[in-house]
Image: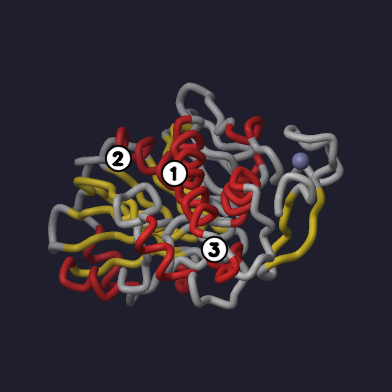
Amino acid sequence: MPELPEVETIKSDLGAMILNIKISGVKIFRDKSVKNRKEDFVRILKGNEITEIERRGKLLMMRLKKDDSFLLVHLRMTGQLVFCDKDKLLAGGGHSDKDKIGCLPGKHTRVHLEFANGKNLFFNDQRVFGYLKIVKKSELPEELKNFGPEPLGDDFNFDYFWQKIRKRKASIKAVLLDQKIIAGIGNIYADEVLFASGILPWRTASSLKRIEAEKIIKNTKIILKKAIKSRGTTFNNYVDGHGRKGNFVSKLKVYGRAGEKCFSCEGVVKKTRTAQRGTHYCGKCQR
Ligand SMILES: [Zn+2]
């Protein structure tokens, strides 16, 4: 699932390519992937332009020139945005096999936007948890009301975090995954942050000491910034116009490394299940 660094990467890549170009055609291949009435969705987008792309947590918000609206895109598990012309793939994303990326509607294409300059944007989504939705600007606060602070923002600080965890009985991993508490962290970065902080993922949030809470905040910011710089992790087949891939995968310390040697001690990285998710940790480095 794309997390904050991956969505941020898509945001900047797409922003460089699709802004201020008229949308000339809209095709919906799966009605349920669009959370508006089909007719409304097509009417508002056709002839419109995306003037700006913002991100909130894992949600992309594309500001539309006309109608005072935003096109929201949530990729969820397997959603993917592919921007391309005939034979050149300009931007991808998501989490599926290479053969599903192409500049034609594929088996998993749910929505296709055509641009006046001949370029195309495909929303592909194999497992169909993702969605597109147009909302009025005035509806945005309602749409975002369950989003916690941005982890890289000043709102995500010790006072805030301490107040959220000090009485919480859930595991600290569940807290990090809770988008109402912090928006944008998913399974990969939760495991990495907890390893960097030396904290076992299943510890009760309320058991954390102040210094441990401080470590989590510090490491969250460091790791997410590094991951953004590396263009994210999850895009096995994410390529842009220059053929670059997200390469944070080579910097992961525990995620996806079960059975391998810990980078910090003589121990071995293990995998268990915490907060209903596959969870990677080192039993020696984390307490
Ligand atoms: Zn270790």
The CA distance from mark 2 to mark 1 is 29 Å
276 or 58, nearer to the observer: 276
Q: Amino acid at mark 3?
A: Leu
Q: Amino acid at mark 2?
A: Ile
Q: Is mark 2 within 8 Å of ligand 1?
A: no
Query: Relative to residue 186, is residue 34 depicted above or below?
Result: below
The CA distance from mark 3 to mark 1 is 15 Å
- From the image, tell me which residue sits under label 1: 221
Residue 101, x across and y down, in percent: 57, 42
- From the image, tell me which residue sits under label 3: 177
SS at badge 1: helix
Colour treatment of the image: secondary structure
SS at badge 3: helix
Residue occupying the point 57% across, 68% down: 205
SS at badge 2: helix
Residue 14, x across and y down, in percent: 36, 39
Quadrant in which the C terminus is drawn: bottom right
Q: What crowding class fits label 1: few (fewer than 14 Cα within 10 Å), some (14-19), or many (20 or more)? A: some
* Side of 188 where 259 appears, left or right: right
Frontmost of labels 3 and 2 is 3
* Side of 60 where 49 appears, left or right: left
- From the image, tell me which residue sits under label 2: 18
Q: Is mark 1 within 8 Å of ligand 1?
A: no
